[in-house]
């Protein structure tokens, strides 16, 4: 059965919580022909982060990742977690080398894609899907911020979203290093089984 909608936002004016579901989301959730018992798993996309970078050589590279955000310390449901984990494996395109073995990556996604906006092929490095959890509703009211289940600070979160830090390893990341001197990297399993206690 399709699960009840749970995402909420806090209204500072009336000091209450309200559901954040869109009209389309409500329609999807109430459409009997798309019920989860029929094999459908529909989930929303939270954030796609993209950064344009120019290497010293002059080559342009776009770095990209998907971020699933959970508030109040919550986790994705098992169905959503499984879907995100599959997507994570499909879209990553980091290259394996003799010194860098990649796990949990379905294959080699293309490194160049055609940009309709730019009208040319562009280099893209996709860092996959990552889980961002706030103990509150966001960075400003959370005592705890977790990136792929690792405790981080607001400053580190900003560095990750700027691609100053590698989203997988949380080590410094430069485009030159990313292409010329790979670090030992192992993409973290997005969602391992967790206890709700």
Image (cartoon, rainbow, N blue to C red):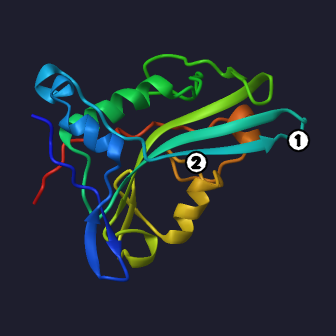
Relative depth, front residue between 77 and 57: 77
Relative height, residue 178 to residue 112 (above, below): below
| Image quadrant occupied by the C terminus | bottom left
Q: Position of residue 184 (x, y in %)?
A: 54, 38
Residue marked by disc 2: 166
SS category of the residue bearing label 1: loop
Find out whether the residues at labels 1 and 2 contact each other: C-beta distance under 8 Å: no
Image mark count:
2
Q: Position of residue 176 (x, y in %)?
A: 77, 40
SS category of the residue bearing label 2: loop
Residue 181 in sight here: no
Give the residue displayed 41% in from the left and 68% down from the top: 138
Marks 1 and 2, the one that precedes in the sequence: 1
| Image quadrant occupied by the N terminus | top left
- Which quadrant of the structure image shows residue 139? bottom left
Give the residue displayed 81% in from the left and 35% down from the top: 60
Residue 56 image label: 1
């Amino acid at each position: 059965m399709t699960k009840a909608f749970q995402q909420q936002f806090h209204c500072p004016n009336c000091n209450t919580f309200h559901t954040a579901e869109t009209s389309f989301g409500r329609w999807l959730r109430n459409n009997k022909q798309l019920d989860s018992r029929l094999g459908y798993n529909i989930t929303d996309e939270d954030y796609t982060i993209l950064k344009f970078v120019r290497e010293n050589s002059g080559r342009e590279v776009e770095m990209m990742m998907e971020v699933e955000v959970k508030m109040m310390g919550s986790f994705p449901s098992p169905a959503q977690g499984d879907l995100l984990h599959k997507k994570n494996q499909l879209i990553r395109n980091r290259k394996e080398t003799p010194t860098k073995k990649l796990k949990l990556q379905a294959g080699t996604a293309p490194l160049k894609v055609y940009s309709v906006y730019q009208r040319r092929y562009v280099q893209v490095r996709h860092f996959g899907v990552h889980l961002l959890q706030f103990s509150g509703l966001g960075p400003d009211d959370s005592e705890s911020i977790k990136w792929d289940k690792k405790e981080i600070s607001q400053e580190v979160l900003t560095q990750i979203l700027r691609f100053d830090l590698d989203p997988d390893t949380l080590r410094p990341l430069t485009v030159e290093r990313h292409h010329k001197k790979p670090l030992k990297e192992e993409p973290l399993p997005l969602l391992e089984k967790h206890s709700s206690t």
